[in-house]
Image (cartoon, grey):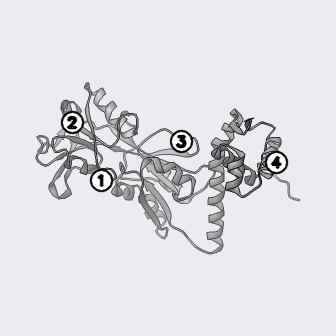
Amino acid sequence: MFNPPVSLLDDPVDLRRLQQFVCVAEAGGFSRAAQVLHLSQQALSSSIAKLENQLGVALFDRVGRQVRLTAAGEELLSGAQALLAAGQVLARRVRDVAAAQRRAYVVAHTPAITSEEVHALLAPVRHAMPEQSVTARQIYPSELEPAVLDGRVDLALRRGTAVPNALAAAVIAYHPVRIAVAAGHRLADRTSVAVTELRGERIVVWAPPGASFYTDFILSTCRRAGFEPALVVDRVQGTAPVTAVLDYPDAVAFVTAPRGPALGGSVVVVDVEDPPLTPVQALWLPHTRSAVRDLLTTGTNPQTHPAAPVGG
């Protein structure tokens, strides 16, 4: 005789009602949400009331036609989006299995992580799962979380350590930073430089302080070396980090590219002495399983640096 686990006896949340709750929360009211869901407002209100009764809490404060999430509602919303997205991922995987299809695993990465670095990070997957197709796609940092939540991306890679509320995360590698300079720069002939030698140099970044982990990482690296850097934000976004100094030939840029000439010799990448290590963080949907992700987040990769970061 089948004995259901305790979790199945605990009256689990109805995903349809959960989806309706999210719609009301995002729309800011029942009237607009009812239009989006193609339901009558009465039917939607009744469904949300049943969800509140099931959970034994009030999810909204209702003041006239305005609704506002309660503390309990805020907590439910923080987990609901990831749970609904995980349900969609599971449904897609089930259909793929039934159709004997193996879809490409989509890995997104921000411009701060180059396509070459992504390829190196994929080494455990390429070696252990040679038949698995993987698609790498560059997107901007602001697009990462929505892309993972709506299923366009299976795993996202960025420079950072903070964990978004709706996602799971792990730091999977650290990369030593170097500096990129134009071929005519005074430091282009050096084999290595100390961070302290960058005092007085303009440093190219891709976002203002406070808007980017990587910018803040660079800022803290310079401050630990005893100086306040002169930052300039690159006008061109989305290209390889080494390109940053092409429009600022008197400046330097912190990059993770290999040392030596780059871009046909117009740029030179120089080692940094005792280099800071910048993290690579992977983001994915909680409540999901993936053999590819397991290899990416726990597999041994000879191209990455296992040590703890110096700072940032």
In front of the other: label 2 or label 3?
2
The part of the image, by quadrant, that contains residue 35 is bottom right
Label 4, secondary structure: give it.
helix
Q: Describe residue 258's horizontal placement relative to residue 44 as left or right.
A: left
Amino acid under label 3? Pro
Q: In x, y percent, where is residue 42?
A: 80, 50
Residue situated furthest top in the rendering: 226
Return the mark for residue 202. Answer: 2
What residue is at 58 percent from the left and 44 percent from the top?
166
Q: In x, y percent, where is residue 160?
A: 43, 41
What residue is at 72 percent from the left and 58 percent from the top?
38
* Residue holding disc 4: 46
Does the CB distance between marks 1 and 2 fall below 8 Å? Answer: no
What residue is at 24 percent from the left and 38 percent from the top?
203
Tell me the CA gap for discs 4 and 3: 32 Å
Mark 1 neighbour class, 10 Å CA radius: few under 14, some 14 to 19, many 20 or more: some
**Residue closer to the observer: 150 or 186:** 150
Going from N to C along the chain, the mark reached first, 2 or 3, is 3
Label 2, secondary structure: give it.
strand
* Residue holding disc 1: 240
Tell me the CA gap for discs 2 and 3: 32 Å
Residue situated furthest right in the rendering: 1
Amino acid under label 4? Ser
Say if 246 sits above or below 213 in the image.
below
* Residue holding disc 3: 164
In front of the other: label 1 or label 4?
4
